[in-house]
Amino acid sequence: MSDVTQILSAVRAGDDSAASRLFELVYSELRQVAAQKMSRESVGHTLQPTALVHEAWLRLGADAQPHWQNRAHFFAAAAEAMRRILVDRARRKQAQRRGANAEHVELEDLQIAGPADDDQLLALNEALDRFAAVDAPKAELVKLRYFVGLTTEQAANVLNISEPTVKRWWAYAKAWLYREMQGKG
């Protein structure tokens, strides 16, 4: 059983200090992922990795952590929190610049945890929401790979599936999202 899983069990058991230990344990990993993501953001971004991690932690419940089932459940929620933060930020910036006219772009132009302007991020978010309605497990993989920046191996561990399955799902998800973003879905 991993340290994260043990601490999550302590949270469920009512240990008041477990949430603080959880934050200390996952902070560096989440900070590293956020730093990697932010280093590839477009020039002029104002969100810093530390701020992204702290905002995600607050959205996850901070010291009043919900009862996470396991490590995978926690990191899936962290991926979703980071995704929502980035999408909310992009929406606010877009509303200030040009209103709500999101431009659809090719998914091939998007890199894993790579630079994405606000329009691309919003278009991907909309397509990902549609994909989640069709195939939730594969949409979860996209969130973990794109928004958290997990490797194939890390995503396989979090989702508790094999690496070849992750590769197949990832290829399918990219093709589905590309087609959807092109308006051919």
Image: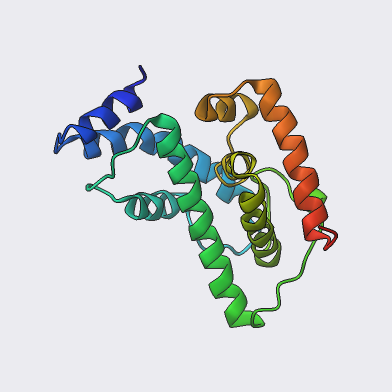
Q: Which percent across, then down, holds residue 78? A: 44, 45
Which quarter of the rendering shows the C terminus? bottom right
At 22% from the left edge and 47% from the top edge, which residue is drawn?
Answer: 63
Where does the image place residue 37, in percent across and percent down from the top left? 58, 46
Quadrant of res 166:
top right
> In the rendered image, is residue 109 in sight?
no
Image quarter hosting the N terminus:
top left
- Please report the residue visible at 82 percent of the width from the left and 53 percent of the height from the top: 179
Q: Is the residue 40 above or below the residue 105 in the image? A: above
Residue 141 picture quarter: top right
Q: Which image quarter: residue 59?
A: bottom left
The vertical placement of 143 against 167, above or below, is below
- The answer to whether one can see residue 58 in this image is yes
Name which residue lies at 28% across and 45% down: 66
**Residue sitting nearer the eye, 74 or 133:** 133
101, 53: nearer the viewer: 101
Is 32 displayed left or right of 27 in the figure? right
Give the image location of residue 172, x and y in percent.
76, 39
